[in-house]
Image (spheres, rainbow, N blue to C red):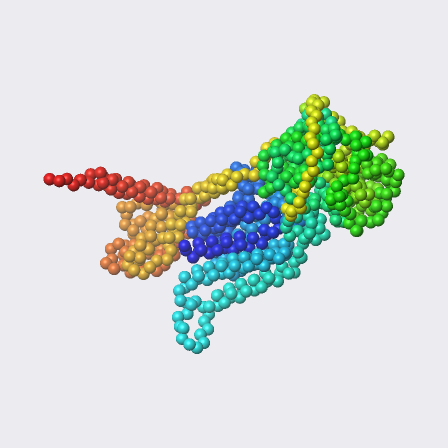
Amino acid sequence: MSGRARLTLCATAATLMAACALLPLVDPATWLFQAAFLLAVQSGVGALTRRVPLARPLTVAAQALVTLMLLTLVFARHQAVALIVPGPEVFRHFGDLLQAGTDDVGRYSIPAPLSDGIRLMLVGGVLLIGLAVDALAVTYRSAAPAGLPLLALYSVAAGLAGGGAAWLWFLLAAAGYLMLLLAEGRDRLSQWGRVFGGASRAPGPEPSTGAVAPVRTGRRIGAVALGIALVVPLALPSLDGGLLDGAGRGMGKGPGGGGTISAVNPLVSLRDSLNVDEDRTVMTYRTNTNETQDLYLRIVALDDFDGTAWKPAQRRIEDVPKTFPTPIGLGGDVRRSAIQTRISAAEWYGQDWLPMPYPASRVDISGSWRYEPVGRTLVGDHGQNTRGVQYQVTSLMVRPTAQQLAEAPEPPAALRREFTKVPESLPPVVARTARKVTEGSDNAYEQAVKLQDYFAVSGNFRYDTQVQAGSGSAAIARFLKEKEGFCVHFSFAMAAMARTLGIPARVAVGFTPGTPQADGSMSVGLRDAHAWPELYFEGVGWTRFEPTPSRGTAPEYTQSDTPGNDLPVVPRPSDSASSAPSAAPSASESCSPQMRKLQACPDQSTVAPVGPSDDDWPWFKILGLTLAGLLVLVVPLLPTLWRRRVRAVRLGGHGHSETDVAAYTLGAWLEVTDTAWDYGIAPEESQTPRRAAERIARLGELDPEASASAHRLAMAVEQVLYAPRPRPVTGLADDARRIEAALRASATRAARLRALLAPRSAIRVAWSTRTRWAAFTSAWSTRLDTVLRRPTSQNP
């Protein structure tokens, strides 16, 4: 392996080793494999262009262009020309993705889910750093300053991630940088021989020479860079909540070091969805029940209230069962019916949790999904999300009576203990208001209905999506005082108040049933995003309540003792079949807590039609299209690249023997005749070198200096051909370049373009190939004939 190839490989490896410091920030880490593949292609393009060779700025420009095309293929192929050629739409799409990625960085806890925006930021950032490292270390042959972009990559990642494993990423990044420095030193030593090493090993102080200065300088820069890499992360904060928000806006427990559930904070996402300028379709569905007013599409349950926010508790997840177990707490005497719903999500809707009617008993869906048994939810695994997915859900329509809820026995002690926790920071006014509103109630059911009616009917609360959501326990107290807010405020407040009364409660996030369409389907938009409380009653299970005025519908089992309830009802579709009844025995579920990272990311990008998604292409398709794009880019340039390479070889360095002198002189002369041919002066093999030089000078309209160079070169060729001992002549390469410049200056613009893009002398490639093929076939034919005709030995 040549020194430059070794340096290229080390530069690529050093970039990837430094990029490993980003791994704790995002889950899953599949983006690193994609970045490694694209970085290898980028480095390969650099190696090819340096071999041509191109000028250094052109080499960097070629790598940058190919990098842009690769990013276009992976992230914006639908907006590009022929999947790979970027245009204005591609750059607009990149801007949208980067904006979405920036929003996600501030919204999620560490480790954040791998959204498209974050993936573009990670992969694109690694490619930019890789381009800078390759340009500095390989193209410009200065490896020591290449540590600065590596330092930036490592320091930002280490400062954000924090954690006890930061030293491991430092060692990995430092090893990559030192490997790069050693590769450059070895390459320099191979070029300069003993100059850097010194020949003397005699005792006594070594003489100081200027030759070792570059090595010492490189070592000093390396030592300074590694020292800064150790110090800078100490100055950067280890951010806990969102990636860039120390206030903890992102959902997830603890410092975000791993094993947490990362989810979108409903305080942010729901308000954004409800206040969009245009209501965009999130999904459409068809169902075989006409009772769609109760068909809420539930995404996730928020059951952990720590005083800062409601969020999903840390739960184990498992493979999706063929049939879900009976919902916890649901008794056999409660009326229920099984319904089927077929759902199609919009292609822009990238959500890690699967919206489903609750409680689901079976889900038919393709892709990589996992099941969380306590919340009875499905979460995407290995980057799986809801973009364009189509699936069918079998769920139960549970219809308890008011009497069944009122006579519900005490819940299990473990469940009651877990789901009635309230933080010590909860203001006393919350519990005091709950007791006041539910005064005189005989049971938990009456308390729950009174809480619902207090918010929805009698408490003079006003629904307003423009109210700032706020966070923490104080937000609930402020809401009870100001009495205006939207579904987040109502559901959070009712769940917290129910817990102070000893009623197990949690908050569900999802969508209201949506709007019926003319074709019998239902359409769910961003403005249908909703949050509602779920309260637990033994014998019935988790039960929906609706405290938000003018949103959704109050369940039928809460209206028996609430005359005057005028909450609106969502219209029902006309062409639905009635559901079929079914019954199942009661069963309980166990949930052993295990640390597992889950995500939820509603994406608010541009709307796209509902249908199957092809965003997650297999790697062989991306590889094939990448190679096809490179062929489309490179094939038209092959003649130009071949001429540049041939010119560099013919006019490059040479030895000092007689054979070397002859080869070098004849190569320079052949380069002159080929250059003249490219500009329209076809060679005439019958002419002597001197007559050929005169012809080129005349037809090419060379200036006197270039004409003299042509004659001087012709005389050198004649000496090589006829002199008994040819003597080396200096300056032949300069003469050849001077002639080429004069031919280009006297040619028309069309001739110059033809000579650059379609040089006539490139036909020599075909001639050479034909000659070699003829020699190859002749040799094999002779060998085969010899084998077939070889006489066999016979006894006389």
The answer to whether residue 338 is visible is yes
Task: State left or right for residue 567 relative to residue 20.
Answer: right
Residue occupying the point 53% across, 47% down: 33
Residue occupying the point 61% across, 45% down: 114
Question: Observer-nearest residue: 13 or 97?
Answer: 13
Where residue 144 sits: x, y (%)?
52, 61
Question: Is residue 716 positioned above or below 788 on the image?
Answer: below
**Residue reaching furthest bottom?**
204
From the image, which quarter does the C terminus lie in? top left
**Residue reaching furthest left?**
796
Residue occupying the point 45% across, 71% down: 209
Residue occupying the point 69% across, 24% down: 580
The answer to whether residue 472 is visible is no
Where residue 235 sits: x, y (%)?
65, 60
Task: State left or right for residue 186 relative to residue 556.
Answer: left
Question: Observer-nearest residue: 167 or 788?
Answer: 167
In terms of image quadrants, where is residue 520? top right
Question: Is residue 535 positioned above or below 665 on the image?
Answer: above
In terms of image quadrants, where is residue 458? top right
Where residue 244 sits: x, y (%)?
67, 52
Question: Observer-nearest residue: 356 or 334?
Answer: 334
